[in-house]
Image (spheres, rainbow, N blue to C red):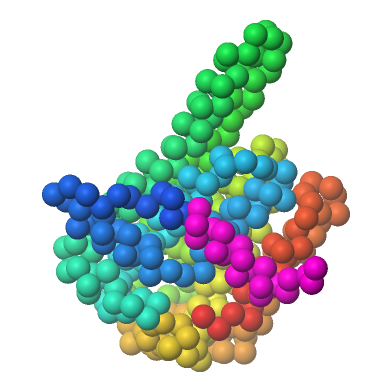
Amino acid sequence: MKAMTFKEELASKTKEVEKIIEQFYPEERGEHKLVMEAMNYSLRVGGKRLRPLIMLETYKVCGGNGNLIQPFMAAMEMIHTYSLVHDDLPAMDGDEYRRGMQSTWKKYGEGMGVLAGDALLNYAYETSMQSLIMVSDTYNKTSSESDPEYYVKALEKVHIAYQNIYMAQSVLMHKAGISGMIGGQVVDVLHDGKPMTAAQLDFVFQLKTCALIEASFMIGAILAGADPILIDSFETIGRNVGMAFQIQDDILDVIGDAKELGKPIGSDEKNEKTTYVKLYGLENAKAKVEEYSNAAISELEELKNSGSVFGTLFLEQLIESLIKRTK
């Protein structure tokens, strides 16, 4: 059988992720079903599914198996999607299109756009806690075992799984909140139409963009049972990947193709935003993308060489692809 290319493998894995998160979409019913429709529309607009993909691959390279990770994958995509829904609002960036389709607020109205974003954030936390139900089901199956020793060992595993789930939930909330993504968005809004220093821009990027990518790596490691040192290493990898990703986003807003991106280019200039391209120039910004990407790959290779993780080839290729992405 012919081995898949990275592009083919990425398409296959993205499709797998798509199927997983679709299982957790809210059911559109009741008098208030319009908000669920708007939530699902926002999620179905698509995207790279980068964050849940990173989460799943990190889970695997750290030795994780089973479905425990799946509710967190869906929750992460919901949080990321809600941030985009709110970013597009007239009070923020005012973008009318997202990935070639009408922005949520443009299709459903500004008020429903706000509510759909709010609902996605809240539903994300509900969804992530479905991992507890999965563990409870495991406990119910093992509780009928007659062997006391088997029962005690199973109960210990359930206890550890609960601890890991609560730790993962804590990371998810922290990285999405005022010390993470929202905090970065606050500083971004405060400088709307005003110049930022390099330090301020890095602060915005590290919170607004890097935080959720860091969380994706960390949660994958946590739910696989990784130790604190390994989790910290993945947080560093996530920060470098996030910086590379966001700087490349700045670059594509200048030289990208609107049809391929699925949104208008030049919005940063229109909104008078400080970007890496504006501060450092196009070529230096490109060099920064490569620098951060290489730092992330080097850290991952060190973990592989130390025996802390295994089977990292796809994850390395995924990080490398960020410096070449055109959308």
Residue at the far front: name it.
1
Depth check, front residue: 38 or 98: 38
Residue at image location 33% in from the left, 60% down from the top: 40
Of the 4 image quadrants, the one containing the N terminus is bottom right
Q: Position of residue 187 (x, y in %)?
A: 37, 64
Magenta stretch containing residue 11, yes or no? yes
Magenta stretch containing residue 14, yes or no? yes
Figure quadrant of residue 274? bottom left
Residue at image location 40% in from the left, 55% down from the top: 78
Residue 271 placement, left or right of 23 = left
Report whether residue 254 is seen.
no
Magenta region, residue range: 1-20
Q: Is residue 230 above or below residue 301?
A: above
Report whether residue 209 is seen.
yes
Figure quadrant of residue 107? bottom left
Q: Position of residue 16 (x, y in %)?
A: 56, 59
Depth check, front residue: 241 or 271: 241
Q: Position of residue 184 (x, y in %)?
A: 42, 61
Residue at image location 51% in from the left, 27% down from the top: 137
Figure quadrant of residue 227? top right
Depth check, front residue: 284 or 228: 228
Residue 324 placement, left or right of 198 = right
Residue at image location 16% in from the left, 63% down from the top: 111
**Magenta-drawn stretch, dominant element (helix, strand or loop):** helix
Q: Position of residue 88 (x, y in %)?
A: 30, 72
